[in-house]
Amino acid sequence: MSWPVYIEELLKTKGTVSAAIASSDTKALSVWAKSDNFSNDDALVLDALKGFASEKLLETGIRLTKDVKYMTLNADKDRAHGRKGADGVMIFNAGKAVIIVTYGGDGIANEINPHIEKFAEHLKKTL
């Protein structure tokens, strides 16, 4: 599958608003593919990736842009989840890549999480 096809698959998950797949390298952000409506500030995404498996994200929250700060609900070496009102963000470690998904509206984290987690496991095996 090509990267844009992966993004299309991620967006099929009910409630998913935007998605991106990027390198897990924390020195410079390299976005491999993203949905047209995925908005980010590279430096802020790098900060989130650097704090991925530490308590830093729990203290600072998750920011993809300067306009929105998600309160971090949980973060470990495999995933991070943040919310702001009815909207949320999930970041999954997929080995050499990370998957970043935003959701809102009718998106329910418990329904989105298993689908994205399965997708991350697939990328871990294939990259």
Image (cartoon, rainbow, N blue to C red):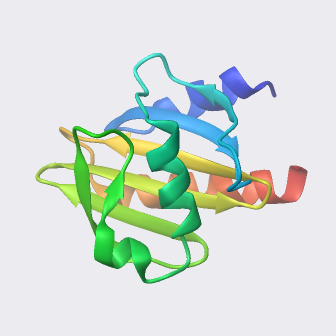
Kindly indicate the quadrant of the structure image that contains residue 103.
top left
Q: Nearer the viewer, residue 115 or 64?
A: 64
Q: Nearer the viewer, residue 124 or 114?
A: 124
The structure residue drawn at horizontal position 79% and vertical position 24%, both measured from the top left corner, is: 2
Kindly indicate the quadrant of the structure image that contains residue 49.
bottom right
Q: Answer with left or right where residue 114 lies relative to residue 15.
A: right
Seen from this angle, which residue lies furthest top?
A: 36
The structure residue drawn at horizontal position 43% and vertical position 34%, both measured from the top left corner, is: 40
Q: Answer with left or right where residue 13 lies relative to residue 32.
A: left
The structure residue drawn at horizontal position 60% and vertical position 72%, both measured from the top left corner, is: 78
Q: Is residue 97 above or below residue 42?
A: below
The structure residue drawn at horizontal position 49% and vertical position 58%, both measured from the top left corner, is: 47
Q: Answer with left or right where residue 121 lies relative to residue 39.
A: right
Residue 71: x and y in percent read 23, 64
Seen from this angle, which residue lies furthest left?
A: 85
Quadrant where the image shows the N terminus: top right
Q: Is residue 8 above or below residue 122?
A: above
Residue 35: x and y in percent read 51, 23
Residue 11 visible in the displayed image = yes
Q: Answer with left or right where residue 23 lies relative to residue 19.
A: right
Residue 107: x and y in percent read 27, 45
Residue 12 visible in the displayed image = no
Residue 87: x and y in percent read 21, 47
